[in-house]
Amino acid sequence: MTVVSALICVRDGEAYLAEAIESALDQTAPPAEVVVVEDSSTDRTVDIARSYAPVARLVQPPPGGLGAARNTAVEASSGELVAFLDCDDIWEPQKLELQLEAFARDEELDFCFTHTQEFATPADRERFVVRPAPLAGALASSLCARREAIERAAGFDVDVRIGELLGWLLRARELSMRELTLPEVLVHRRVHANNITRRERDNLDDYAHLLKASLDRRRCGHARSEPT
């Protein structure tokens, strides 16, 4: 049986962490473990995470940002598969079951996303855009991947404030890894004032830097492959 680890990275997530952990524990195909990596919170995040021991294990590395936290979560886990859940998002109960079925159907599959639906409180709907249509693919909370695939694409970027998932995904695609996006909405993404894309809006250039680095690598690889 394939073992999957649920990995939750959190900083100052006291308002949402319990709901995220509960959604991981309530899976129809429960994870073998839930690893919570906490990065320098100043609220009650640590107390909430500890309240779920021993079914959820708390890891507290030195502060290093989200990319470093995701890498720490992978290193601290034991599953052949790793599934990421941001502390403010929620999984549908069948999320891991359907992804495990996808990996069982295709032994060459490296990673799998799902569709995601955004949601917000009525007050936050007044303040922020909540997209009504389901979103496909590259959201960390929908990613389930082989541990080997995370490592083969060099893990998550630690030198960016935002876009650590994009950096890994670009490298995975450069390596022609096999991927799939399930059609079902299996993740709910919470829209609120402290979303990282909103909190780190001054660092949105990180996306452009990651895309340029990928383009440069592809150009260099193409140049090396051309006959001399």
Image (cartoon, rainbow, N blue to C red):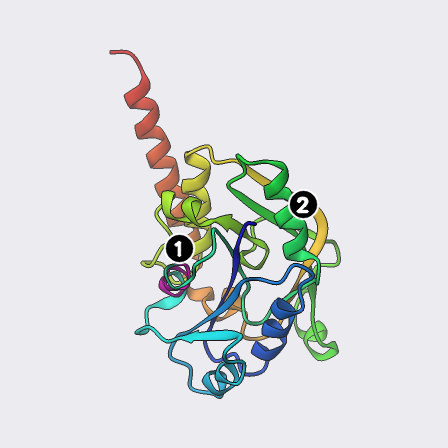
Q: Which residue: 41% across, 45% down?
A: 148
Disc on res. 182: 2
Q: Residue furthest left?
A: 228
Question: Taking 131 as reference, is 124 above or below it?
Answer: below
| Kind of element beneath mark 1 | helix
| Kind of element beneath mark 2 | strand
Please give the count of numbered marks on the rendered protein: 2
Disc on res. 111: none
Q: Residue 13, how many percent across, how many down?
A: 52, 79
Question: Taking 186 as reference, is 177 above or below it?
Answer: above
Question: Taking 43 as reference, is 153 above or below it?
Answer: above
| Residue at image mark 1 | 206
Q: Are marks 1 and 2 in contact (CB under 8 Å)?
A: no
Which of marks 2 and 1 precedes in the sequence? 2
Q: Which residues are magenta?
A: 68-74
How far separated are the C-alphas under marks 1 and 2? 28 Å
Q: Nearer the viewer, residue 68 or 191?
A: 68
In this view, the mark in front (1 or 2): 2
Q: Nearer the viewer, residue 60 or 228?
A: 60
Q: Residue furthest front?
A: 1
Q: Nearer the viewer, residue 164 or 122?
A: 164
Query: What residue type is disc 1 on?
Result: Asp
Q: Is residue 80 magenta?
A: no
Crowd class of label 2 (few under 14; some 14 to 19; many from 20; radius 10 Å): some
Q: Residue 211, how many percent across, how many down?
A: 42, 44
Q: Which residue: 65% across, 45% down?
A: 101
